Structures are given as C-alpha cells and as structure tokens.
Amino acid sequence: MKNRRLRQPHLRFAFLITLWMLATGSLRAAAPGTKPATTWFERSLVGMEVGPTGAQFGYSDPQDTRYCARFDGREIVRRCVAAHCEYVVIWARDGDYAYYDSALLPKAPGLGARDPLRETVEEARSRQLPVIAYCVVQQGGHYLAAHPEFAMRGADGKVIGGRFCLNSGYLDAMKQIVAEQLAYGIDGFHIDMLDQGFGPPYGCWCDACREQFAAEFGKPLPKGVTWDEDWDRLLEFRYRSSERFEKALHAHIKSLNPRATVDFNYHGNPPFSFEVGQRPVQHAGNADFVTGETGVWGFSALGVGLNAEFYRAATPGRPFQVAIQRGVRMYHDQTTRPLADLRWELLTLLAHGAFVTCVDKTAFDGSLDPVAYDRLGAAFADALARRAHFGQTPVADVGIWFSSRTRDWVGRERPAEWFTSFQGAQKAMFYEHIPWGVALDENVTLGLLKRFPVVMLPNSGILSDRELALLTQYVQEGGKLIVTGLSGCYDRWGRLQEKSSLEGLVGARLVRKLDSLDNWVRFSSKVGIAVPSEPPRRPGRDTAPGRDLRGETADNWPFLVKGPAAVFEPTTAQPIGELLKPHRTVRQQQGKEGTEWPLSVDAPVGPALLINPLGKGMVLSFASSPDFATASEHHIVEARRLLVNAVRFLHPAARVRITAPANVEAVVTDDPPTRTLRVHLLGYHAPPQTTPAKERPYVLPALLEDVPLFRATLECSFPIKGVKAFNRSTGLKRRGQRVEVTVNDVHEAIAVKY
Ligand SMILES: [Zn+2]
C-alpha cells in the first residue's frame, strides 16, 4: 500500500517536504502573515481523537473484561505521533465509564489496574504532544442509571430516557469529574454532547426546571409544545440553561487551571434546531473555541464547507475545530475510508480555515487499526506540507443570511424544510464557484455585512427591527441584497403577515402567498422585461437586466422553480418576468389528491423578479425560491442559474471569476501582507452507487477512490504579478489576467500575486 501511495507524484512530493520539515522542526511554524501562536489550538492543523468501541450505546456489561483490554494510552500516543498529529484527544469519560482511575465513576472493565489517561499524559509529555481529555455531558448509561435525580423529564412528567437535565445538580457532579481529569496534567478538554436531545420528547419539566422557570419568568412552565408566547419563554429558558451550564463548567475548569483549554462540541448549525437547546451564536462562543462535526456519512458533501463557514461566522475571529472520522458510514463502524476520501474532507476543511481532528474509534478490545494510521499519516503529512496555504483571510462575494428566529418559529418541528433554502443558496454558490460566507442574525453588524458585496436572504421569514435597520443601511450605503420567497413575510411568532417587513427594501407589496411549491417562472423578451433606472453594466455585453438574469434560458419558456412563492405588486421596484402558478386537477382542488409531485404550468400570477435601486445600493427580489429549488428533489440547472445570474448582475466586478466543473469547490482567501490571492480548488469526484437495500432511491454517496483530473480558469480583475500552483502535477498557463490550470488531485492552491 505504502509504495503504491508514494508513486502518486503529489504524495511523493508531500513526503519529501514532510521529511524536510521534520528535520528542520518547522512543522509547527505559524502560517506567514499570522500572529505568533501561543496555545496548541492556535498553532495546530491536525490531530486525532481516539476512543473505544463497545460502550457507545450505554449500559454495557460491566463484567465484560474483553472491553478495552488493549486500550493503551502509550500505544495511542506513539501511533498518533507517527501519523504527524499535533495533539491527541483521548477518551476519558463516556456515559458508562471512566478510562482512568476515578473515585467518582466506574472504570471500563477490561482496563484492570491500567490507567490509559495516565499512560497518555506520560507518553505525550516526552514528545511535547498536547493531550486533551474527551469527556461527555449527555449519554445514557451506568452513571445516569445510578443517578436518577439528574434525569430529564418530559411535559408528561415521565423520565426521558438517556438524558441529563442541565438544571438538576448534574453540573456539580460534572465539576468534580473534570477536576479529577485535570489533576492528570492534561492540556484541555473536549466536552461532547451538550445537547438537550435530538428530537421529541423535549425537556425538561423536572422539579428543578419548574422552580427555576417560575423564578425567572414568574409563570409556570407551559403544558407542552404550544408555539405561542409560553413556548417562546420555554425555548428561551432551554437556551439559557445550556448557556449557564457551559459558562459555569468553563469557568470552573479555568479556576482550577487557567491554562487548560475548553471546547464544547457544537450542534447549533443545520440540520440541528431548537430541540438541541443551542442558538447558533449564543452557544458557539462559551469556550476557548468551537468544535463541530462534518462527514458525508451524516451531513453531506456540501455540509463539509458549509459547517466550517457556519462555525467561523458563529465565532468571528477565533480558531474553529472540525471533527471528521476515519470510518465509512458512522463512528465505531470499524472501517477505514480510502486516502483520497480522507484527504478531500481534510483539505476542504483546512482550505475553509478550520483545524481538524480525525476521530478513530478502536476495536472492541481497544486495539488500533494500523492501516487507518498509515492512511491518516499520509493525509496529515500532505496537509502539513501545504500549511503555508491555510489560515488567510476569506474572500466572500456573497453572505448567506441565517435567521435563527426563522429556524425556530417558521421551521418549528420541521426545520429541514426551512433549511432547504439556506442550503440551496450555498449549493448554488458552490456549483458556480462564487465565494460565499455565512451571516448570522444574532451577531450581525453593519461592518460584517459590508464585508460581503452581496447579501442573500434565503427565505428569511422573520426579520427583527434591528436586522431591518441594518439591512436598509447596508443597501443605502451601496450594498446589494438578494431576497427570496417569503423573506420578511412572517411575524415574530412565525405567522404570515399581511404586509412584508421588507416592503420598503423590495419595493413591492405582498399580495398573497401561493399555496403551492411547484411554482413556475418565465422570461420573455416581450413580457415584463424592462431596463431599471440604473442597471449595473458590464462593458461589451448586452446588459438588459432581463437577459442577464435569464442567462441562457430559452425565451418564453416556463420552468419549475420549486419552493415557496408569493405574488408581489411593485410599488417602486421594476418587475421582470412572470411567476406562474401550477395546474391543479379537480381531485386536487377537492383535496382528494396530494400535491407533492409538481404539476405543469398554469397561468401567470405576478412578476418573477423585482429590482429596486435604493440609495447607493440595490435590492433584487425573487417572488419564487431558486435557493429552495436548488436543494430540492426537483432541482433544475436553470433554477440555480437564476440565483447565480443575480449575484453576477449585482456584483459584476468580482476580484476573481472562477470557471470549473460543478463538482469542484473553490475557496478564495486573501493575504494582504504578501499581496497574495489564493484560490483553493477541491475536486469531489464520487463514483456512482447502486440501488440501496432500503429507502430507495435515497443513496448514500460513494467514497472517493481516485484523484480527479479537472480544468479550471481564473479571470482576475487585477494585473497578475505572478502565479504559482502547489502541486508539481498541475498544468498552469497564464494569459494576461487569465490563468488556466489542469489539476490532478483532490486539492490545489493557486497563489496569485497582485
Ligand atoms: Zn430539568
């Protein structure tokens, strides 16, 4: 395996570079242009988390001495160091056991007299490898069974299986547990599972929560899920409970050892919603840095970059960690992904500015899979060789707005449907190589908005007065806003309003929401296309906005833009194109037949687009939801292009315009001190799958086995002073301000000097 791997030119090069870096001790040097790193998480790119397999479902047999019999801290450290890890996260506590000599918790049965936490700390000390203890908060198992007083309860008063209540007094128990682990001389904690559950029944209605809620709100807990003011208070109470617990645990650890780092595993991003008890910003910043998870196995290929940018937005200016795993399908599954697959995910995250922990779940007896460490070692060596290309300032032409209030009150108990618009906006930008970032309602400022030439509101139904004022100022001072579907059409409680909050920005009145999702759009050179007062123009092209926005779509051709839509009546906006409702059969009209499957186009009901120049900026609104359409099951290319054409229409002078296949992701960063614009190109080249055994046709993506071969073109808006590729296998041609590359790898970083 090893020889075959090194025969690939980019890896042979990476291997040589790594040897050189190891020899010169430069593996831990900070990237140029960044301030000197002081703590392990500021200077690290890659690490491992190692934990056992066999107690993950809780309530494992405490007499089974085979479990963890070979879980060996010294061996784990040696393997991690050989694999070029810059830190190790070692399993110290789960819902069943401690993996050290604890006075508070039962010890994993196979360990006998051994203490893997002590072994890890001792072995790592001589190698200057930081050791982070993995410690859970939520997990059903022997500890919860022994402490029923900490159990979460549902609205019916019954215990919710497997969950701790964060207000129950469990915090004091956790403080004692972390103190025990700190005494080993660890460098920090990775604290996992701070959720309040991942679905119904929701908690908590225990006596402690009843008492505390009454003290805070002067009212009794609501009777259940009511989606009214009482429920709003309960959601707030749940958020506050999580925040108090996190802050108190963090403060306690710092009081015992101010140098020990703390990070909490985070579930504030899609697909998670209110049930977890985390708001995107409120719960990301309560520790030294945030950690989240990606993985095609659970969060899609597009989720890798999306999660990284979400964590960045939730904790601006701070390092953020992303956990990936070595297994094919799910943690603990005893499989190892191919090298290309591991490298693609790792390098995608590094390109987005994250540092990355790869999770290895050992065999039942605690032994390690040598092939997994060989592959990860190759992936990490390659990543470290590219270190100088990571960590620069992101360049984003588009900021995709995420409204947590809309998540909770429009998404309610079906948030995935609402997430479709946010995720579709990101998918469209990815496929078309428009650099994007995330803007979160909780921490958005005018300065943050102004970093994005274009801001997109993907069905952001609920907008507060503060947010509306910021968006208005952003546009008036030159910002470009894209609005889709029912943005601004809901009140604080998620009820449809008669008047859109965005009326002044959109320049049109809300007439009615369409009941259908299978809505249509048509552009015709004869109908509804006119030139707005001051269209942005690109020299040398036919720049009638209707044509620009329509792109290559055939004249007078209706096409499906699946998703929420509304009829708007322009006041100050210029209408373009037509929104058309779908046909409904008689049986559908009688309510006897479903409408899940799209039906053909019927009649026009309003304009498709509205362009409203305002102050120095402009608002472009879609009456339909091309973002929703893009992530829906009825995605057509034309729907996606509407969104992309809108971005290019509003922001024609991007610093770099990238052309590449749709399966190539582009991440753009800037390094002003060295005047270097970097374009990371990441090729996601998954082979086809066959029919699944269940839930056809919902296939899981295949693993990447080969490195792709693809072409890309970068057209820069500035004179190029020099351009370099990282991989020696990359073909590179420069013609004026245009660079053409042929890449034969999952990752390339093109550095363009300006
Ligand atoms: Zn409770």
Image (spheres, helix red, strand yellow):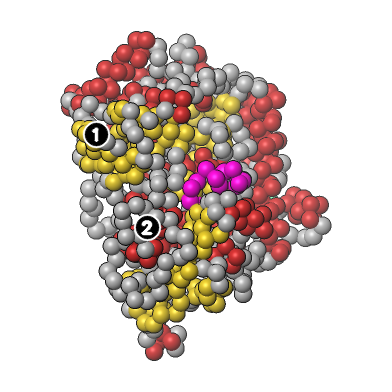
Q: Is residue 153 left or right of residue 56?
A: right
The picture quadrant where one finds residue 734 is: top left
Q: Which residue is mark 2?
A: 645
Q: Is residue 86 visible?
A: yes
Residues rendered magenta in the picture? 443-455
Mark 1 touches mark 2? (CB < 8 Å): no
Magenta stretch: includes residue 449: yes
Where disc 1 sits, the SS reads: strand
Q: Which residue is mark 1?
A: 734
Q: Position of residue 584 (x, y in %)?
A: 39, 84
Q: For disc 1, does the CB lie below 8 Å from ligand 1?
A: no
Residue plotted at (39% across, 55% down): 537
Magenta stretch: includes residue 259: no
Residue plotted at (52% across, 73% down): 570
Residue plotted at (42% across, 35% down): 669
Q: Is residue 301 left or right of residue 481?
A: left
Mark 1 or mark 2, earlier in chain: 2
